[in-house]
Amino acid sequence: MMGMLVALLFAASTAFAATADPALDARLKSLESELRCLVCQNQTLAESNAPLAEDLRREVRELALSGKNDDEIRAYLVARYGDFVLYKPPVEPVTYLLWFGPFLLLAAGAAIWFALLRRRAAMAESTREPPDATTTPAGELARARAILDE
Amino acid sequence: MATLPAANPPSRNRTKVLRWTLPLAVFLVIVAFLFVGLFRDPREVPSPLIGKPAPAFALPKLHEPQQKLTTADMRGQVWLLNVWASWCVSCRVEHPLLVDLAKANLVTVVGLNYKDEPKDGLAWLAERGDPYKTSIVDRDGRVGIDFGVYGVPETFVIDKTGVIRYKQIGPLTAEALNDTILPLVRKLQAS
């Protein structure tokens, strides 16, 4: 019984270290970090412990070992689960609003801001008192004289 | 607007109106989005496989492991592929509906025994009734992945040419069967 357990543990540990290839591990880690786990939807494939995530990691590893590049692996998952598996959605007509919407809002905000500034400037211009004969220094002097001369 | 004092120039009236209509419009748009969102299930991921040929498989049958069922064997008939497992709790909920459906003999149902121990699957069917024409064994879940399965149970409607026409995510309900799946099956059978 004990021997079986030890054998099992050994098998498990060798299964986890299936590839002694740090470069591949790093590549898979970064690829899996931008793929969504379908079961626990706010986790990436890299961090999820769901059985399906384990299976998908196994598939991704096998695809990588068979020479597929990252785009081909992504396409494999998208064909089965849709764009939903990608944390970074592709730029295509349906996602234009998603990608460019924030810039649109920024532009709209800037436009409103400039319009307000211009209006405010125009208003300040129109409410300023026109230079008046009585308010210029020469006019004041004339007024003072007129009062004194009375 | 006509009651406003004439002293206000028209452009200032427009600004005043905008000052409350614009935020109101933005607010209403947000409310509309959130309201629609209330009735959508974020767990239901639309399948990209609808309208595409069902993935090819060749899997051993649960009852006769030495025999295999392939996608090609199902050509020429409308059939349902029901993904189930003995460890799946909601499969117990939908199972009586499948048993009734089998009795009514309206459509062929194939079971995909997903990531299960065959002996557990067999015991489960023996206990609850076997509504499947045949069940096939997907021990490591690879065919499940090909079908985009991410939660059990799931049910696919597949037409005579082997194209997936519909996918039910989660347990079947009487409404889903009567309102969506069976009308679709009848339509596909007639065509």
Image (cartoon, rainbow, N blue to C red):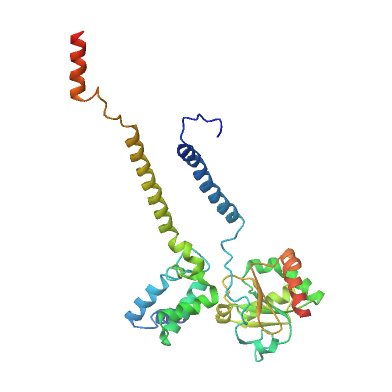
Relative to B191, residue A53 above or below: above
Quarter of the image that includes the C terminus of chain B: bottom right
- Relative depth, front residue between A112 and A59: A112
Residue B40: image x %, image y %? 60, 59
Q: Quadrant of residue A131?
A: top left
Residue A1 visible in the displayed image: no
Task: Please give the name of the residue rendered at 49% of the width and 80% of the height, measured from the top-left corner.
Answer: A76
Residue B170: image x %, image y %? 64, 67
Residue B80: image x %, image y %? 70, 77
Task: Please give the name of the residue rendered at 35% of the width and 81% of the height, measured from the top-left corner.
Answer: A24
Give the total of numbered labels: 0
Residue A108: image x %, image y %? 42, 52
Relative to B111, residue A114 above or below: above
Residue that extends furthest to the top in the rendered view of this protein? A150
Q: Quadrant of residue A136?
A: top left
Q: Quadrant of residue A124?
A: top left
> Is residue A118 rendered to the left or right of residue A82?
left
Task: Please give the name of the residue rendered at 34% of the width and 82% of the height, measured from the top-left corner.
Answer: A21
Relative to B122, residue B43 above or below: above
Quarter of the image that includes the N terminus of chain B: top right
Residue that extends furthest to the right in the rendered view of this protein? B104
> Is residue A121 rendered to the left or right of residue B182?
left
- Relative depth, front residue between B121 and B4: B4
> Is residue B165 rendered to the left or right of residue A92?
right
Residue B77 visible in the displayed image: yes
> Is residue A102 rendered to the left or right of residue B95?
left
- Relative depth, front residue between A31 and B132: A31
